[in-house]
Image (cartoon, rainbow, N blue to C red):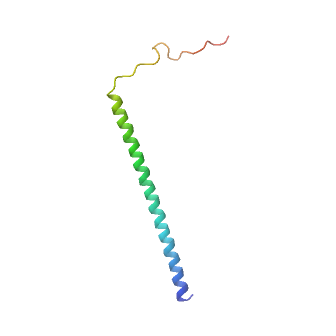
Amino acid sequence: MDHTERGAENSDQEYEMFEHEIAAAARTTDLLREAAAYRTAGEARKARRASLRGQEPRERVTGPGTRGARSAPRPA
């Protein structure tokens, strides 16, 4: 193997290492973006809950005795 072949081989190895570093940086960026979106969603849920606490309690849609009642009579 002469000097030029070794140089080409080293260049290929450097390129592969560089390519690996770019892929790792891209994965890190994706994970950071995902974590930021997760935190934002959690903060939005907390804010929504806090704003609902300040409102008057909602009235029940059904009366107290209708829980579990059927909507149609059973067939004979």
> Residue 73, percent across and down?
61, 12
> Residue 32, percent across and down?
41, 54
Q: Residue at x 37, y 34 (%)?
A: 48
Image quadrant holding the C terminus, namely top right
> Residue 63, percent across and down?
46, 14
Please identify the quarter of the rendering in which residue 60 is found: top left
For this orientation, the residue located farthest to the bottom is 2
Q: Residue at x 35, y 36 (%)?
A: 47
Q: Is residue 17 left or right of residue 76?
A: left
In the image, residue 41 sits, relative to residue 12, either above or below, namely: above
Q: Nearer the viewer, residue 21 or 44?
A: 44
In the image, residue 54 sits, relative to residue 67, either above or below, namely: below
Q: How many marks?
A: 0
Q: Residue at x 50, y 73 (%)?
A: 15
Q: Residue at x 41, y 50 (%)?
A: 35
> Residue 24, percent across and down?
46, 62
Q: Is residue 43 left or right of residue 62?
A: left
For this orientation, the residue located farthest to the left is 54
Image quadrant holding the N terminus, namely bottom right
Q: Is residue 21 left or right of residue 51?
A: right
For this orientation, the residue located farthest to the right is 76
